[in-house]
Image (tube, coloured by chain):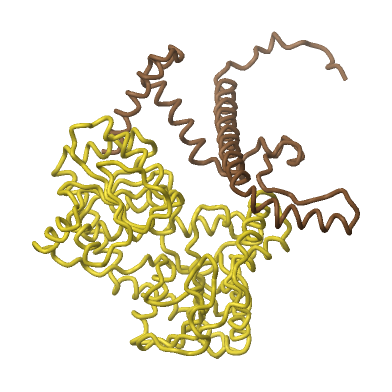
Chain colours: A brown, B yellow
Amino acid sequence: MTADLRERVRGRLRERLLAHGASRHFDDPELFATVEQLLQTAIAEGDAGALLLPELLGDAETWRLQTSMPYQSHRATGPAALILFVKRRVLMPVLRWLFEYSRDNFERQRRVNQVLFACIQELAIENAALRQQVRALAPPPAAASRPGGVEGR
Amino acid sequence: MKLAFVVQRYGADIAGGSEAHCRALAQQLAPRHDITVLTSCATDYVSWRNVHAPGETRDGSVRVIRFAVRSPRDLHAFADLSDEVFDSRASPERQRAWFTANGPDVPDLLDHLQRFGRTYDLVLFWTYRYFPSYFGVPIVKERAVLLPTAEEDHAIDLDVLGEFFTLPAAYLFLTPEEQALVSSRAARPLGPAAVIGTGIEPAETSDGRARTLLEQSGIPRDFVLYLGRVDRNKGCHTLLDHFQQYLDAFASDELTLVLAGPAKMRVPPHPRITSLGYVADDLRRALLAHARVLAVPSPYESLSIALLEGWNYGVPAIVNARCRVLQGQVRRANGGLPYRSGEEFSEALAYLRTHENERRVLGEQGRAYVDREYRWPTVIERVERLLGDLVGQRANVKGQR
């Protein structure tokens, strides 16, 4: 029952995307369903701890969205304490609504980034698996075509 | 068995899933076991302000010992700390500080566990995220049974939980999805566990009074029911959007969305959306008895009791498929339809509106699932089997020494 309902929704979505000029590849309902399934898997399985790309991006400080407000000052200990107190106890309560608005938006952006990382990972896995299959299907290179003589060292 | 139940708040007037679960289990087990509830003096989970007097009272045959909250929650400091620990890889010290700040800060309860913890056969802890469980489990870990009531929210990703989740002697989970979630965060494989859910009393047969009550409350004949706190965290903003999208697509359908629960967010004025606020038990039962469909839009759940209550009355559900627990409950019961978007919500609702027989069958399948899995005798048998095995094993180990 759920599959039938989803099929109808998918059909309408495909028509809408095509009407807005989506790739003609989406003319093929089967291909569209495969693409949708792949992206849905990325969204559903996109656990941040299971993603490769963030590990490869290097120091998280250089790319990761920071949604918390760090309280710090470059001043010496005495004035710094006063500045931090004012930031934390005077300014922040007044500006909290603005901070929370921004933080919620950053959170959304972070979620989108994570989903995109997951999509790229799914596509990369699919691509790598296809390469392996293509390599396995390819005929072995003919013995005659191998260069003779001593291999270069 | 002599059992201690540790929970952040306790009482008949406490509205909270884990607190209600703890109290219901205490009441069910009390006729056959010696139950002591160890809890705070607070009734409000936001401030943890002391309301009850510290000391011993009784709730029927359950002994209740309350401990004073040392300091109420500093909301701004807690919000800052939450931002810090959920945003980045905060140090273990900062993460532990979060559990202290989350409260309720009841050092005397920990002291009680230090001094008297070994006098209980087992100590059951509700909800991993609060101070009493996080700091209490390590004190009596060899006899601790954790009911994590875990959801897929930020807190479950804290690094310090990896070790914490391996400390208890055993676990009671509400759903298989919750068990899988906690297992995935634990540093090592978990010990003995049982998935128990919760007990639901069979629904009373509906009579004419229920319909009269609904008419007196201005509830139309055809309505979709949302049951619970009306809150963004419960996905209510998307429910309101999706329902309006449905009305746009199916303008001829005279369906109304009825929200039954205290509103913690603004509900836009709309002729086909009725927000009742808190509802008394008799109106709640009448709503369940006459709802066409139950909507459960929450993205985070460890077990949806509203969903079980709906099925208890034979009401099919449409649920947020992004929530694994809801998806799992609906799949096992075959008692509703999951949706992933506004379009799927509309399609599912339209289907149930136009296929009365299928709507009824889904509701009945839900009711059969509740009969099979969620009646108190079934739940209690699962609980007692696990607890009995644990106590038996400990006695055997003692005997061999």
Q: Is residue A62 left or right of residue B311?
A: right
Which residue ends up furthest to the right in the rendered image?
A76
Q: Residue at x 31, y 56 (%)?
A: B227
Q: Residue B200 location in percent, x, y?
A: 28, 68
Q: Residue A34 location in percent, x, y?
A: 43, 26
Which residue ends up furthest to the left in the rendered image?
B208
Q: Residue at x 50, y 65 (%)?
A: B148
Q: Residue at x 68, y 13 (%)?
A: A143
Where is residue B190, by image quadrant? Answer: bottom right
Name the one closer to the observer, A19 or B9: B9
Residue B334 appears in view: no
How many marks the image carries: the answer is: 0
Q: Quadrant of the N terminus of chain A?
A: top left
Name the one closer to the observer, B296 or B170: B296
Where is residue A152, by image quadrant? Answer: top right
Q: Is residue B387 left or right of residue B215?
A: right
Name above or below for residue A5 compared with residue B39.
Answer: above
Name the one closer to the observer, A53 or A136: A53
Q: Residue B384 location in percent, x, y?
A: 39, 78
Q: Residue A93 location in percent, x, y?
A: 64, 54
Which residue ends up furthest to the top in the rendered image?
A145
Residue A125 appears in view: yes
Q: Residue at x 31, y 48 (%)?
A: B295
Q: Quadrant of the C terminus of chain A?
A: top right
Name above or below for residue A77 compared with residue A116.
Answer: below
